[in-house]
Image (tube, helix red, strand yellow):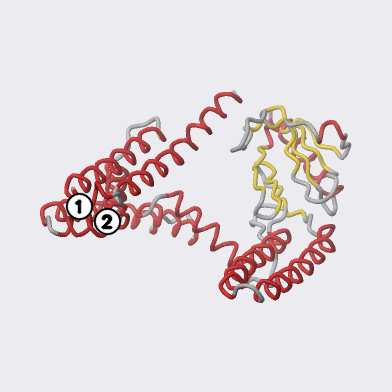
Amino acid sequence: MTAVTADRSGRRIATIVAPVAIVAGAGLAARTTLAAAYPLPALLLFLWIVADTMTLALLARTDRKPTVRVVLGTLAGACLTVVVGAPPALRATLWAMPWLVTIMAAVILGHVAVAGRSAGRAWRAPAAGRRERCERAASALLPPMLVRLATAELTVLHLALFRWGGPPDVPAAARGFAYHRHLAPMCAALLILSAIEVAVYHLLLAHWSRAGAVVMFVLSDVGFVYLVGLIKSFRFRPILLTRDGVRVRAGFLIDRFVPLEAIVGVDGDVRGEEIRDAATLNAALLAWPNVVLRLRIPLPARSILRRKPAVVRVAFRLDEPEAFVRMLRWRLGQGADRR
């Protein structure tokens, strides 16, 4: 099962990285002197490579037959990629062929029409919240991965810049357990050191290069904002105990749901060899965990760079572990009685 999961993960990564590399290579080839000497064949070849690559990547990502909306969206994305990525000589050749422009415009408008209907249905969904409806509606018009990335970025920026108070994010049918108190002194020290580092780098670099100082200032400020968002997310995103399981969170770095039926036991007996085991998900940050969930049903590992075994233990640290352990054991006992 672990090998199958890893193979699927590797195939998914390949279907993302390979098309980007192929399209980028085709874009570089379209800027050569040979392409400038023969703009029409170069344009048609560029269009074919982009459309074919994106369509094959779509077929490789799914085991089912893609819908008309998804195919139209892929072809519309290929048309827009060619228009944006083509060099001026090829773009001028494109505008000189009204029939090709008409076909590409028809594909894009067809995607907007078909996806617009799906977006309208997603927005009118009665059971979903406003944020979820916005994500579903946007995913009907734009690539879902791009929508998820934009949503995550906006969430971090909103948390860092605009959310300075209020209760943590705990749904009505869940119980939240904090883990941020032991992190507060270290987080405060990290923020102070980061602010000093930003100021020193900016002042020193400004003596040698004004442009470099501006670039460093922008990059360091963005990093500082993300650091503020991460630190604040520790308080606003506690670990949740719900009717169906445990949602283990560590700010926006870790978010894994562990179903109740997958948990065979919970305790505070944390042994070093278990925590260092590759089959343990350690969600404790800058501290030793004080709660361990032992699983009878392993969770699939999430790793991009290397293969890891399935997760059989989940470890984390809570500010008040006794209440969590007591309540979870009660929930597990109820589940055992129902079985």
Which residue is more in the foreground, 171 or 111? 111
Residue 215: image location, x then y, percent: 57, 69
Q: Is residue 279 left or right of residue 80?
A: right
The residue type indicated by label 1 comes to: Met
Q: Nearer the viewer, mark 2 or mark 1?
A: 2
* Count of residue discs: 2
Q: Is residue 256 left or right of residue 319?
A: left
Q: Secondary structure at mark 2?
A: helix
Residue 93: image location, x then y, percent: 17, 56
Q: Secondary structure at mark 1?
A: helix
Residue in the picture at 67% in, 32% down: 261
Looking at the image, do the residues carrying marks 2 and 1 touch, with CB atoms under 8 Å apart?
Answer: yes
Relative to residue 157, is residue 274 depicted above or below? above
Q: Which mark is residue 83?
A: 2
Which residue bears the numbered disc 1? 104
Q: Quadrant of the N terminus?
A: top right
Residue 183: image location, x then y, percent: 81, 58
Which residue is more in the foreground, 261 or 91? 91
